[in-house]
């Protein structure tokens, strides 16, 4: 099995179903074709659904601009009878509304009283990420759905992460433009909770700020009625994300953090030229990776 380091330079030539962009590339003599980033996201989502979702499955339905294409494709396959007996488990109210509108039968974790033969209530979950490091750790929560996403994706036997090429990084943090780490915190005494986060992470050269809506004054409130604090690692590289996760988890008032460490079994990467790559094995470390 290739390491992530080698797989970053491998374009898979498999076509699990109606994988339109790769097929078009094959018909053009194998030359890459230009595609918008939305086309690439859609291609990655359809690739993941076609390869990893089959009849009689319980499927975790992700949240975000890439995951919505997976939800739409699952609905298409259900409606044209290609997929049968599919149950969706949405990771947010927005995804729930989309899935219901598209006709996907839905359940929640409470009602999944039976597990598959390997002991998991969900067979596969497909979702996006804000950033993916070279060890296949993820930062999620840009859409403020991190708690439900983590609960559902931990309950899945296989979690497939689908992203576009821009989400791949060697490591988290280390620059002012790096993706922030979302932390879901209680509304009660939220300023105190953020002060505690700053103190606990002070050795990591980070800032902590509350997330607001686009008007700049209305706090972002999650589906669970909590606030979001964004942690930005400006000066330090987060080479061992599990360490930061372990520091955040004991803080009273922290409901959940957006570090998804070791959870993704496969990362499907969409390129702007229409190609798709699968990453299944982490690289040995950030310094081994050469983009």
Image (cartoon, helix red, strand yellow):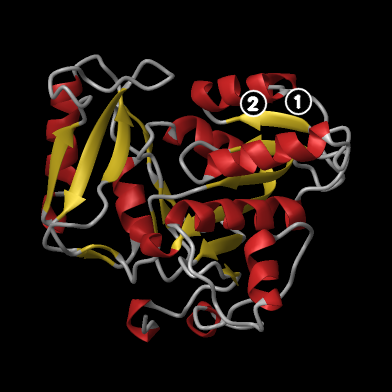
Crowdedness of circle 2 by 10 Å Cα count: few (<14), some, many (20+)?
A: many
Tell me the SS state at disc 1.
Answer: loop
The percent coordinates of residue 105 (x first, y second) are 76, 23
Q: What is the x, y in percent for residue 287?
A: 32, 82
Count of numbered labels shown in the rendering:
2
Quadrant holding the C terminus: bottom left
Please report the residue visible at 51 percent of the width from the left and 30 percent of the height from the top. 148
User: Any mark on residue 112, and which?
Assistant: 1
Say if residue 154 shows up in the picture.
no
Residue 35 visible, this angle? yes
**Which of the two discs, 2 and 1, labels the residue nearer the N terminus?**
2
Residue visible at 16% across and 22% down in the picture = 215
Q: What element carries label 2?
A: helix
Q: Report the mark closest to the observer, 2 or 1.
A: 2
Vertical relation: 288 (above or below) 220 = below
Q: Is 244 positioned to the left or the right of 164 in the image?
A: left
**Residues at marks 2 and 1 touching, judged by CB atoms closer than 8 Å:** no
- The residue lying at 13 percent from left, 24 percent from top is 216
What residue would you read off at disc 2? 99
- Label 2 – label 1 distance at C-alpha: 18 Å
Q: In which quarter of the image is residue 167?
A: bottom left
The percent position of residue 201, horizontal first and vertical second, equals: 18, 48
**Percent from the top left, x then y, of residue 237?**
22, 66
Give the vertical position of 174 relative to 146 (above or below): below
Residue 3 tag number: none
On screen, residue 226 versus residue 119, left or right, reads left
Question: If the image is split into quadrants, where does the N terminus sit?
Answer: bottom right
- Dot 1: within a 10 Å radius of its alpha carbon, few (fewer than 14), some, or many (20 or more) residues? few
Residue at 60% across / 35% down in the picture?
152
């Amino acid at each position: 099995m290739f390491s992530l380091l080698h797989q970053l330079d491998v374009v898979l030539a498999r076509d699990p179903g109606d994988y339109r962009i790769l097929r078009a590339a094959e018909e053009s003599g194998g030359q890459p074709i230009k595609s918008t980033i939305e086309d690439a996201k859609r291609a990655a989502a359809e690739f993941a659904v076609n390869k990893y979702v089959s009849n009689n499955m319980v499927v975790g339905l992700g949240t975000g601009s890439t995951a919505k294409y997976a939800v739409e494709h699952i609905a298409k396959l259900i409606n044209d009878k290609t997929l049968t007996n599919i149950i969706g488990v949405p990771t947010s109210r927005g995804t729930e509304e989309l899935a219901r509108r598209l006709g996907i039968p839905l359940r929640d974790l409470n009602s999944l009283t039976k597990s598959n033969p390997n002991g998991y209530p969900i067979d596969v979950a497909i979702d996006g990420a804000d950033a993916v490091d070279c060890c296949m750790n993820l930062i999620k929560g840009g859409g403020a759905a991190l708690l439900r996403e983590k609960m559902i994706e931990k309950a899945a036997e296989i979690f497939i992460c689908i992203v576009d090429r821009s989400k791949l990084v060697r490591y988290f943090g280390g620059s002012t433009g790096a993706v922030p780490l979302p932390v879901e915190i209680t509304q009660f005494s939220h300023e105190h909770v953020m002060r505690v986060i700053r103190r606990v992470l002070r050795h990591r050269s980070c800032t902590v700020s509350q997330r607001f809506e686009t008007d700049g004054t209305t706090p972002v409130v999650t589906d669970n009625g909590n606030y979001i604090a964004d942690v930005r690692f400006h000066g330090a590289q987060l080479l061992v994300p599990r360490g930061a996760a372990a520091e955040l988890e004991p803080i009273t008032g922290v409901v959940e953090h957006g570090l998804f460490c070791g959870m993704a079994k496969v990362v499907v990467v969409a390129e702007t030229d229409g190609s798709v790559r699968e990453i299944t094995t982490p690289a040995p470390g950030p310094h081994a990776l050469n983009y």
